[in-house]
Amino acid sequence: MTAHTGERNGPTNRMPRAGPLAGLRVLEFGHVLAGPLCGRRLADFGADVVKVESASRPDLARRLGPYPPGREGDLEASGLYLSANAGKRAIALDLQTESGRAIARLLAARCDVLLENYRPGVLARLGLGYPELAVENPRLIYASLSGFGATGPRARWGAVNAVLQAVSGLQALTGRAGQPSGLANSWADYIGGLHGLFAILAALEQRASTGQGCWLDVSLFEANVASIGAAFYEEPLKGDVPPVPYGCYPCRGEDRWCAISVATTAQWEGLLRALGRPELATDPRYVTAAARAQRADDLDALVVEWTCNRPVDVAVAHLQAEGVPAWPVARIDDLAPPGRVLDGRAFVLQNHPGVGPAGIAGTLATFERTPLAPPPPAPRVGEGGVEVLCDWLGWDEPTATAALAAC
């Protein structure tokens, strides 16, 4: 990767951002998604989030894409990185050097939140664990996100999205019986990052009354187990009947589908009216929910025969008119068509330096009294490092520039 010397560590001229967390300083040692997403949301709400990486060890998300056409492999153009890191500043520190670790300790002494999602013990081995840093900064909230938490027999296990979906029970819930199926997106990381955000906000509230910081040990596994909700009660309530028909059904056109969920007798009768088969309402094979569940495959075939001959909007309109919960299954280009933004909230179109127009996810909420501005583009490696040292440590620009050159 080419180092952006001068430009990389020079001033970014980013104005302080408004929001309910304005003035909050966050030092992020995040990589890939769970940690960076948590930092992104703090930045959305106005926090000054500084991302730590280095030219020799950039965030792995930069290598995972997706990339714009013609920019394959460009570490500054990865869509995953751009979306998870918008709104942040960055500093390039080589934590394998004493000078890099020394600057990290100085920044940690002046921040409110340190956020990291390395395997447990990585930062501690570098002298950047919570006990060491809390001596200099007792108000520090040190948030550690990891696959299985920092304690217990699985603490050292590697954890990626597919593993976490499997062990938390999510894959068993999202497929049909006997055929587990994971979610294609990095669901486990998103859920873990959001739980990290909730924990940090709770710790900030606690610090406001006690004046003391704390260490937060956030397990992505536990966060994902929590997301399966009422499935905990599946065994004692296994006599309950699942909705049938239920699922996604193909419609006319290429890759067009509608989602249907029939959970009540009224919805079942409405479905039959839409299908033009009202006589099945009194058919003994389907008259009860339990009977319908026993013949789920037959009912699915009946629904597919009807949906596949209709455009998705027509099918959904007919079903909704009969009181049947039904929705088009949105494709990505339905949500944010290329070149434009659907509503300016769910998606934001940025003009990223060196990348051009790039669509990223918007903020989670709006605040009436402190309107949130769209986030600035994600930083390049170390972009704004000199500015951060001047702002947080009070150094002058020559001193900051020389310090960063040594690490």
Image (tube, helix red, strand yellow):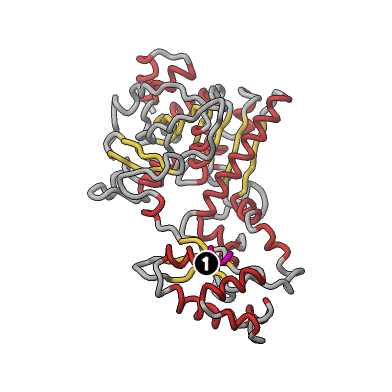
208 relative to 317 in the view: left or right: right
Classify residue 286 as left or right of residue 371. right
Q: Is residue 79 visible?
A: yes
The amino acid type found where label 1 is placed reads Leu
Q: Is residue 403 magenta?
A: no
Q: Where does the C terminus fall, quadrant-wise?
A: top left
Residue occupying the point 31% across, 48% down: 338
Position of the N terminus by quadrant: top left
Mark 1 residue element: helix
Measured as percent of width and height from the top left, residue 215 is found at 65, 36
Which range is magenta?
319-323
Residue, x 71% and y 67% (percent of image)?
A: 234
Kindly indicate the quadrant of the structure image that contains residue 113: top right
The answer to whether residue 37 is above or below residue 166 is above
Name the residue located 41 percent from the left edge and 33 percent from the top edge: 94
**Camera-nearest residue between 122 and 287:** 287
**Crowd around label 1: few <14 · some 14–19 · many ≥20 (10 Å):** many
Q: Residue at x 61, y 63 (%)?
A: 169
